[in-house]
Image: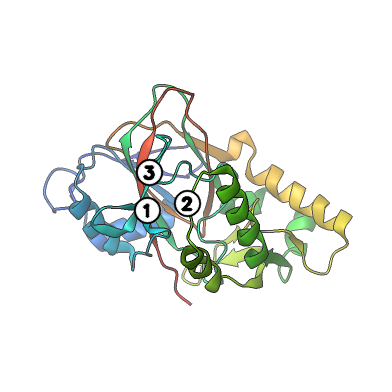
Amino acid sequence: MTGLTEYGLGLRIDGFSPAGSGPGNLARPTVRALLREFGVLHFTGFPDDNDAYSAFAHWFGRPEPVFPAEHQVPGHAHMRLQTNVRGRGANAGGQYWHADGSFAEVPTSVTLLYCEEAPQDEGETLFADMRRAYLLLPDAVRESLPGLLGNYPCRQIAARDMERAVMMRTVTLSEEDRRRQLDHLYDFTRPLVAEDPETGRRALHLNQHWLSDVVGKPDSESRELLGLLYDTATAPSNVYRHRWTAGDLLVWDNASVMHKAVPAPRGQIKTTRRITIAGEK
């Protein structure tokens, strides 16, 4: 096992077999503990086997269903196909800083992303260490954050996004699909700082798409504070940049890291399969 950064974010694990054999064999409690400690796990040479991948995802909890159905991997309703090949699956990952599932009152806990085909250039996924970002803030700012809430007008934002996607023909959505996606969305608030109930470690919780402002602060103060938080979190010295290779599997803890996808160059294919794990209240 090898660290991915000098400051403790991420761990590379070679030779791991989800079937429980091989030199990299690790038990489920060990893998879960490593994820909690390092935030991102990089498994190299993971088998290209959707059944094995799905079974491994259950180590971390209950997989979330994928909507719309056209983005599902056939035979796997909880596995999302993501590719820049037009007409096949979801055409892009989130190209902005976010934690998965931030649109839900109980956000996604863990994300797994398997690389089927990697581009030769670019197409990376970036990860920001949100626990370290919290500690890097000026003392006065850090001490002011507990109790502050971020505003998430998710239903309004999702309706706007779906309308735009349909107009641009990047996705086909029936009225039933639209209703189904909007039915589970609400407008809510969430603390800007999350605390791990087991370790007590604190982390910033941000999202450049769903988080609109800080509750109770004038617009100018809200923009200034959020700007500082994003700048601190996404500084190059706080970001791990993952260059994909076919067979890579990344697993990350959405409570401790934020991520962002970099698009692949035109003419180069990037295809991944994603499983997200439901959070717990």
Q: Residues within 10 Å of mark 2 (few under 14, many from 20)?
A: some
Q: In front: mark 1 or mark 2? A: 2
x, y percentage for residue 202?
59, 62
Q: Residue at x 47, y 51 (%)?
A: 172
Mark nearer the N terminus (3 vs 1): 3
For marks 3 and 1, give the CA distance. Answer: 33 Å
Look at the numbered discs 1 and 2 and tell me whether their residues touch, using CB distance below 8 Å.
yes
Q: Residue type at mark 3?
A: Leu
Identify which residue, 209 or 216, lies in the foreground: 209
Question: Badge 3: few (under 14), some or many (20 or more) residues near its Cα, within 10 Å?
Answer: many
Amino acid, disc 1: Glu
Q: Secondary structure at mark 3?
A: strand
In this rendered view, identify the residue nearer to me: 129 or 164.
Answer: 164
Q: Which residue is mark 2?
A: 172
Q: Which residue is outermost to the left? A: 21
Q: Position of residue 268 (x, y in %)?
A: 41, 24
- In screen coordinates, is 168 left or right of 13? right
Categorize mark 1 by other alpha carbons within 10 Å: few (<14), some (14-19), many (20+).
some
User: For residue 193, which numbered disc appears in the image?
Assistant: none
Residue 11 badge:
3
- At a point 25% along the width and 61% down the height, the residue shown is 28
Q: Give the SS element for disc 2.
A: loop
Q: Which residue matches tag 1?
A: 70
Report which quarter residue 188 is drawn in.
bottom right
**Between 23 and 252, the one nearer to me in the picture:** 252
C-alpha span from label 1 to label 2: 9 Å
Residue type pointed to by label 2: Thr
